[in-house]
Image: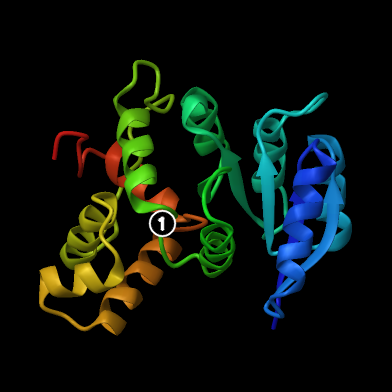
Amino acid sequence: MSVRVLLVDDQPLVRSGLRVIMADHPDLLVVGEAADGAEAVRLVGELGPDVVVMDIRMPGMDGIEATRLITAGPATARVLVLTTFDEDDHVYDALRAGASGFVVKDMALDDILAAVRVVADGDALIAPGVTRRLIADFVGRPGAAPEGPPPTVEGITEREREVLTLVGRGRSNAEIAEDLFITVATAKSHVSRLLAKLGARDRVQLVITAYEAGLVTPSR
């Protein structure tokens, strides 16, 4: 099955470029385009995409508010944010709004396409070096802590706690398996159970939970 993609950017040239590139990949199907956040929210409900490639800075409703509305609603679409290195503050907001990953606009097109596939699969972080830095900075910032008490991780096993800690440190399933002397399939099963038990949409939210619950700190 193809990954159904909604492209959201106020620049027609950006949307057109991504559409043309994705047209050459049968596993990626562009089902629609939006020029602002409000249109994106509407089209998610109408078209049911798997992944929304979302620009942050747009007139009217921006990508952050659109991400918040999409991830809070009944749709299962995951949001992949388009960003630049000088927009970290906006990325932090998008992360809290529920974005599943990040790509930098000047990345190689093949890397952006790979990011769409990874977000659709929900199995790994996007651009690990960038994402780990963003999350570490995010949780270390004043005011970044969630309102109320830290999220609880009660109800998970000791092994799942170990896996969650490693996920929080940015480890892939293969790296977790190596660290804990288990198979990759077992590591993936632990991650899947953590997603279900903690009510997390994807792996990025597990990372945030690990930081906010104190299992991992930016210096560790």
The quarter of the displayed image where residue 3 is located: bottom right
What residue appears at the point 28 percent right and 53 percent down from the top-left corner?
Answer: 170
Res. 49 in view: no
What residue appears at the point 84 percent right and 45 percent down from the top-left corner?
Answer: 34
Q: Position of residue 139 (x, y in %)?
A: 33, 30
Identify whether 58 is placed above or below 168. Answer: above
Res. 70 in view: yes
Toward the viewer: 23 or 216?
23
Identify whether 102 is placed above or below 191. Answer: above
What residue appears at the point 34 percent right and 68 percent down from the top-left corner?
Answer: 191
What residue appears at the point 84 percent right and 39 percent down from the top-left corner?
Answer: 35
Indicate left or right for 199 with 59 as reference. Answer: left
Q: Which image quadrant: the N terminus?
A: bottom right
Q: Which image quadrant: the C terminus?
A: top left
Outermost residue, top side: 142
Indicate left or right for 29 with 143 as reference. Answer: right
Toward the viewer: 75 or 33?
33
Indicate left or right for 141 with 38 as reference. Answer: left
Q: Position of residue 69 (x, y in %)?
A: 71, 39
Mark 1: which secondary structure? loop
Indicate left or right for 137 with 24 as reference. Answer: left
Amino acid type, residue under disc 1 in the picture: Leu
Toward the viewer: 41 or 115?
115
Residue marked by disc 1: 125
Crowding around mark 1 (Cα neighbors within 10 Å: few <14, some 14 to 19, many 20+) is many
Q: How is the image coloured?
A: rainbow
Q: Position of residue 149 (x, y in %)?
A: 35, 29
